[in-house]
């Protein structure tokens, strides 16, 4: 089909470029913030239990069991939750629901690159407001910029990627109060942080939290995420989602994963310990590493990132080279197993 059959704005947009997904086994893969540990054994069991003739039937369009389990975990009724095919699906539903052609969305920057893609697909404009030098966000400035540009939706990744930094729930609440549009708090990495903002949906009708199973729960290959918002907001979003946006296996696996919080705590503790060691090591090599509340670190300054990235890659260690306008390229490195990080440090120290 000739490209001219596309809508002009689709024709012109760059499209999202996911991190490299090389063939299994060749690389130590520290580039897309997957969990180095397998999911809870209960997930395998739950998926196994689904492998029968019921696969010929459509799944529950609302993921009722999943919503009940999530409700139990957070002490909210099930109608506060909406599952999706990864949190990217949920973010897409939000952009489609709130943002039309010519509208504006706003995000702090640097942050998750997908927000720009979502804005491009809607033929909207994404306004960027830089984080402050200490990775805080001035809520008055952000809200003023949102008001000035008439933003229809605001995105805040919290913890943020690539910086790994967080705003406290009180700071996020302050920001939400000042905004006249909805605020999407993308908590893809909240399982590695000390606090989260889910409780804010009780008192803030414009707060929408998004979560994923790809990071904390080690289920990036399953594709499951969800959002948390006031029931009236969820009811509106249900009109926009695909009827069957989650399959039987992912809903069963995700429900089982949520039910096994002890397993999450165990793998989380290992990742946090490795993160501390990786952070100290990177700093000792001359990098400035913001304190990370996620399962990755971001290495600013220090020896030039591009040749380091290339040299690591030549040794079969894959990290993510992040390029943002106005910033030097910098490496974002996923926290792997201790053995993976030992190997990374061995090669990396030989380069600087
Ligand atoms: C900030 C942020 N949000 C959302 C996602 C997407 O997660 P999912 O795998 O659930 O689509 C990512 C993935 O890297 C991310 O970094």
Image (cartoon, grey):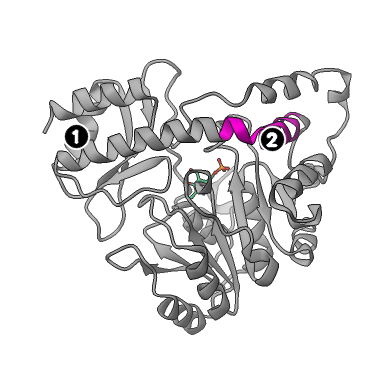
Q: Is residue 118 left or right of residue 199?
A: left
Image vertical order of residue 290 relative to residue 63, above or below:
below
Left or right for 128, reference 76: left
Say which residue appears at 73% left-offset and 36% top-offset: 255
Q: Is residue 156 above or below residue 323?
A: below
Does the numbered disc 2 mark a residue whose Cβ is under 8 Å from ligand 1? no
Magenta portion: prevailing SS class? helix
Q: Classify 97 as above or below 89.
A: below
In which quadrant of the rendered image does the N terminus lie?
top right
**Residue located at (44% from left, 62% from top):** 167
Q: Nearer the viewer, residue 128 or 122?
A: 128
Give SS at disc 1: helix
Assign the C terminus to one quadrant of the image.
top left
Front residue (pair 344, 77): 77
Query: For mark 1, what is the residue?
Result: 308
Whether residue 205 is visible to the viewer of this picture, yes or no, is: no
Counting other residues with Cα less than 10 Å from the Cα at mark 1, is it few (<14), some (14-19), or many (20 or more)? some
Q: Secondary structure at mark 2?
A: helix
The range drawn in magenta is 249-264
Residue 150 painted magenta: no
Q: Position of residue 343 (x, y in %)?
A: 27, 21
Query: To which residue does mark 2 refer?
Result: 254
Per the image, is 258 magenta?
yes
> Looking at the picture, how far across and down is residue 339, in whole percent?
34, 20
Gap in angstroms between the C-alphas marked 1 and 2: 37 Å
The quarter of the displayed image where residue 314 is located: top left
Task: Between label 1 and label 2, give the one nearer the viewer.
Answer: 2
The circle on residue 161 is none
Asked if one can make out residue 28 in the rendered structure from this viewpoint, the answer is: yes
């Amino acid at each position: 089909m000739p490209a001219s059959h596309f809508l002009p704005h689709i024709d012109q947009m760059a499209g999202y470029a996911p991190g490299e997904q090389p063939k299994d086994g060749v690389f130590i893969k520290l580039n897309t913030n997957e969990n180095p540990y397998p999911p809870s054994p209960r997930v395998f069991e739950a998926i196994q239990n689904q492998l029968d003739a019921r696969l010929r039937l459509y799944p529950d369009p609302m993921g009722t069991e999943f919503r009940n389990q999530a409700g139990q975990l957070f002490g909210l009724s099930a109608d506060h939750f909406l599952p999706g095919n990864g949190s990217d699906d949920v973010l897409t539903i939000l952009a489609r629901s709130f943002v039309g052609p010519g509208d504006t969305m706003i995000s702090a920057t640097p942050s998750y690159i997908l927000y720009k893609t979502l804005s491009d697909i809607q033929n909207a404009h994404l306004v960027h407001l830089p984080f402050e030098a200490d990775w805080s966000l001035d809520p008055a400035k952000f809200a003023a910029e949102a008001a000035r540009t008439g933003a229809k939706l605001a995105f805040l990744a919290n913890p943020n990627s690539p910086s790994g930094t967080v705003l406290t729930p009180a700071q996020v609440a302050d920001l939400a109060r000042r905004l006249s549009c909805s605020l999407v708090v993308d908590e893809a990495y909240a399982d590695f942080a000390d606090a989260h903002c889910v409780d804010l949906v009780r008192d803030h009708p414009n707060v929408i939290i998004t979560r994923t199973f790809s990071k904390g729960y080690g289920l990036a290959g399953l594709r499951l995420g969800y959002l948390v918002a006031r029931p009236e907001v969820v009811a509106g979003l249900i009109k926009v989602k695909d009827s069957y946006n989650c399959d039987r296996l992912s809903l069963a696996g995700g429900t089982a994963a949520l039910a096994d919080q002890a397993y999450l705590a165990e793998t989380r503790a290992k990742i946090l310990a490795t993160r501390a060691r990786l952070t100290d090591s990177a700093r000792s090599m001359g990098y400035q590493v913001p304190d990370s509340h996620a399962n990755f670190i971001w290495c600013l300054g220090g020896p030039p990132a591009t040749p380091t990235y290339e040299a690591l890659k030549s040794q079969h260690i894959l990290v993510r080279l992040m390029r943002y306008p106005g910033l030097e390229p910098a490496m974002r490195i996923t926290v792997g197993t201790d053995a993976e990080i030992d190997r990374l440090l061995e090669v990396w120290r030989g380069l600087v």
